[in-house]
Amino acid sequence: MTEIPIIEGEIVDETTKESVRLIQKEIEKITDENIKNFTYQAFAEVDPKFWISPSSSSGKYHPEEDNGKGGLVRHVVKGIAVVEQYLRREMATLREIDIAKSAFLLHDTCKNGVVWESSFTNYTHGLIAAKWLEKFELTDESAKKEIINAVRYHMGQWSYVVSPFEDRPYTKEEMMANVNEIIRALHPSKIERAVQDADYWASRQSMSFFPGISVNIKNNHER
């Protein structure tokens, strides 16, 4: 079994070790060895902060189990469970399932950029990750393209080329680039739809769960 390398020269805490273990467990479910190796290549180079970051940088979004140290990885594991069930219903092929799993595992690897200099989400992280993933080898070019596209458009109608939340005038070219990105994201393939829906449903505050583990759910008025 391939292993995600421990970061040299750094003291790796238990949260990082557990996050690596959880992701590695999901990668090992991919049956196609080439797609599996492509996924491992990317995780070998992901920014170390990926392993310990919360899913919501502000703490306002996502269920409680997705926040706190290592919350982003827990979100990814949850989403994989949704992908599996979505594609089971769609009677997807094993190859489609492998591609979708790889894409969902990788969809937030650049959530705060390739290098995580900020603790806040970069709203163009789908596109950033798509460009970053190009450098990793996968002999099945069609599968690679499908994985990268599913990562790029995983936010559906919130897919952007330029962050729409900057306090400045936007050029016509920037606005049209965002419109075109959103339009493309709203016409997903089966695999892209699986990744989009899994990301959405696994992140809803009312969808509190973790595969195989009981989660205590509180009503909003009890918090």
Image (cartoon, helix red, strand yellow):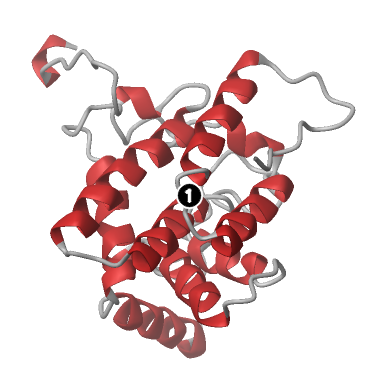
Can residue 221 be seen by looking at this rendering? yes
Q: Position of residue 21 (x, y in %)?
A: 57, 28
Q: Identify the residue at horizontal 50%, vertical 35% (top origin).
A: 25
Residue extending farthest to the right is 9
Q: Position of residue 33 (x, y in %)?
A: 58, 58
Write down the residue under mark 1.
105
SS label for mark 1: helix
The relative height of residue 104 versus residue 191 in the rendered view (above or below) is above
Q: Identify the residue at horizontal 60%, vertical 38% (top origin).
A: 50
Relative horizontal placement of residue 223, taking residue 189 as reference (left or right): left
Mark 1 neighbour density, 10 Å: few (under 14) some (14–19) many (20 or more) = many
Q: Nearer the viewer, residue 112 or 99?
A: 99
The quarter in which the N terminus is drawn is top right
Q: Identify the residue at horizontal 42%, vertical 82% (top origin).
A: 175
Q: Position of residue 95 (x, y in %)?
A: 39, 67
Q: Quadrant of residue 157?
A: bottom left
Q: Position of residue 132 (x, y in %)?
A: 66, 65
Relative horizontal placement of residue 220, taking residue 149 as reference (left or right): left
Q: Quadrant of residue 98?
A: bottom left
Residue type for callout 1: Leu
Q: Quadrant of residue 211?
A: top left
